[in-house]
Image (cartoon, rainbow, N blue to C red):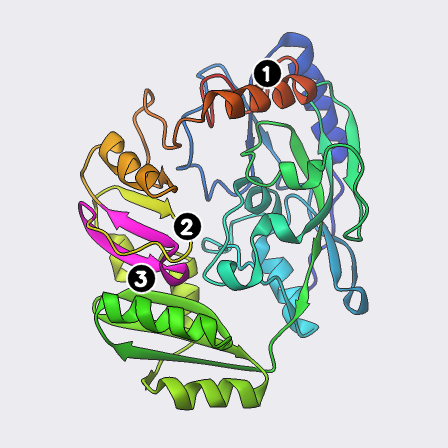
C-alpha cells in the first residue's frame, strides 16, 4: 500500500532565516533538490543556503476543482503521483530529475516539457502563490481561480525568476484531466520534410502534443479522444513508439544529452526555418526549441538565436565570470531592477544568479 507523505509546514523557520539574513544583509542561496543548480551563475562565497525541502506536502487538492495547492519543497514526482491517481495531470510536464526536483524549483525555473507548445508553459498554470519577500514578509498573491489577480501578477512573475524575487513557499496550480487516448509514432524522414509535415498537421488541427526530430526520425505524440487519435495515426502512418520516449526527452536522458560538449537550449519563434547550427541538434516543440551540443562560443550561438527573434541559454555549468542567460535589453533590465528593488530591497535573494545587476 502506497504511503502518503506527511505534510510539513516549516514556513516559520524560512521566514526567520530570511529576517536574519535581511538584518545582516547576508546573501541567500535558495535551494530545493539542487536539480537545476547548473542553471545560472554561482552564488557568492559568503552566501548562506536556505533549504526549502522541509516545507513540503499537498495542502489542498479537490480533483473536481482542477486545482492543486502544495508547498514549495514538495517533490514534483509526489505531485504527479497524486494527480495520476485522480486521473489528472499537470500538462506542462516539468522534469522530475530523478525524483529530486521540487515544486518551488520547477516554478522558479519555469522549465516545461515536450507538451509546452500545445498545452502551455509552467507560468500558464500558476494560479497563486505565497512568497517571502526580502523584508521577511510572508505574502499571498493570486488565488485558486484564474481571474483572481490584483496589482502585480506576482504568482506568474515568480515563474522563471530563479528565486531572485523571493522565496516561494506555496503554489496553486491549474491541472487537467488526462487524455482518454495517447499514442506515439515515429517516421523516417529528413528534417525539412518533418518541418513541412508538422506545419500541415498544425493546420489540420491534429491532436499532436509532442514533436521531436532526432537522428533522422520524427517522433510524434498524439493525445485526445480515441477517435481523433486513431484517425491521426491512420493519416500519419509510421512505427509505434513507446511513450517512455517522452519522459526520457523531458528528463534529458536520451543519448543525445550524454554528449560531453556544452548543452544549449535555443528557444525560437514557431515555424522558424531550419538553419545551420555549430554542432549536433535535437529539434523539440515542433522545432521551436532546439537543443544544441556545441563547443562554439556563447556569442556566436546567441547571435544565431537573436537573428531570428529567439534566445539561447546554456544548460551546462559555466565559469564564474560567464552568464548562461542572454543579456537583457536596457529597458527590460530596468524593469527587472525596479521589481527586484520593490521585493528584495537589500538584494539578498540569489544575487547574480541570472544577471550581475539582479
Q: Earlier in the sequence, mark 1 or mark 3?
A: 3
Mark 3 to mark 2: distance in Å?
24 Å
**Front one among 145 and 26:** 145
**Residue 347, disc:** 1
Residue range in magenta is: 277-293
- The residue lying at 31 percent from left, 85 percent from top is 239
Mark 1 surroundings within 10 Å by alpha-carbon count, few (fewer than 14), some (14 through 19), many (20 or more): many
The residue pinned by badge 2 equals 269
**Residue 261, how many percent across, how many down?**
21, 44
**Residue 224, how many percent across, how many down?**
57, 79
Quadrant (top left/top right/bottom left/bottom right) for the N terminus = bottom right
**Residue 89, how many percent across, how many down?**
62, 66
Question: Where is 258 relative to 136, above or below?
Answer: below
Mark 1 to mark 3: distance in Å?
38 Å
The residue pinned by badge 3 equals 254
Mark 3 surroundings within 10 Å by alpha-carbon count, few (fewer than 14), some (14 through 19), many (20 or more): few
Amino acid at each position: 500500500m502506497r504511503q502518503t507523505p506527511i505534510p510539513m509546514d516549516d514556513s516559520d523557520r524560512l521566514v526567520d532565516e530570511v529576517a536574519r539574513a535581511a538584518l545582516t544583509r547576508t546573501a541567500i542561496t535558495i535551494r530545493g533538490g539542487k536539480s537545476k543548480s547548473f542553471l545560472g551563475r554561482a552564488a557568492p562565497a559568503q552566501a548562506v543556503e536556505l533549504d526549502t525541502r522541509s516545507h513540503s506536502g499537498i495542502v489542498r487538492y479537490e480533483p473536481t476543482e482542477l486545482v492543486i495547492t502544495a508547498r514549495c519543497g514538495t517533490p514534483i514526482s509526489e505531485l504527479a503521483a497524486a494527480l495520476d491517481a485522480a486521473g489528472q495531470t499537470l500538462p506542462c510536464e516539468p522534469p522530475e530529475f530523478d525524483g529530486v526536483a521540487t515544486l518551488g524549483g520547477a516554478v522558479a525555473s519555469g522549465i516545461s516539457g515536450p507538451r509546452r507548445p500545445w498545452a502551455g508553459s509552467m507560468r500558464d498554470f500558476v494560479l497563486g502563490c505565497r512568497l517571502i519577500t526580502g523584508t521577511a514578509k510572508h505574502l499571498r498573491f493570486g488565488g485558486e481561480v484564474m481571474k483572481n489577480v490584483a496589482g502585480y501578477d506576482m504568482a506568474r512573475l515568480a515563474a522563471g525568476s530563479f528565486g531572485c524575487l523571493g522565496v516561494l513557499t506555496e503554489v496553486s496550480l491549474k491541472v487537467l484531466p488526462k487524455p482518454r487516448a495517447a499514442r506515439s509514432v515515429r517516421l523516417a524522414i529528413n528534417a525539412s520534410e518533418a518541418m513541412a509535415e508538422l506545419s500541415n498537421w498544425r493546420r489540420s488541427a491534429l491532436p499532436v502534443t509532442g514533436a521531436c526530430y532526432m537522428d533522422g526520425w520524427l517522433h510524434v505524440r498524439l493525445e485526445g479522444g480515441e477517435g481523433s487519435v486513431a484517425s491521426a495515426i491512420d493519416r500519419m502512418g509510421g512505427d509505434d513508439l513507446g511513450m517512455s520516449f517522452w519522459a526520457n526527452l523531458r528528463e534529458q536522458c536520451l543519448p543525445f544529452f550524454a554528449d560531453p560538449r556544452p548543452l544549449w537550449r535555443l528557444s525560437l519563434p514557431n515555424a522558424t526555418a531550419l538553419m545551420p547550427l555549430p554542432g549536433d541538434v535535437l529539434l523539440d516543440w515542433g522545432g521551436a526549441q532546439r537543443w544544441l551540443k556545441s563547443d562554439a562560443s556563447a556569442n556566436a550561438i546567441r547571435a544565431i538565436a537573436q537573428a531570428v527573434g529567439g534566445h539561447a541559454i546554456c544548460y551546462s555549468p559555466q565559469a564564474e565570470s560567464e552568464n548562461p542567460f542572454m543579456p537583457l535589453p536596457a529597458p527590460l533590465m530596468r524593469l527587472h531592477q525596479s521589481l527586484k528593488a520593490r521585493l528584495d530591497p537589500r538584494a539578498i535573494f540569489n544575487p547574480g544568479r541570472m544577471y550581475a545587476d539582479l
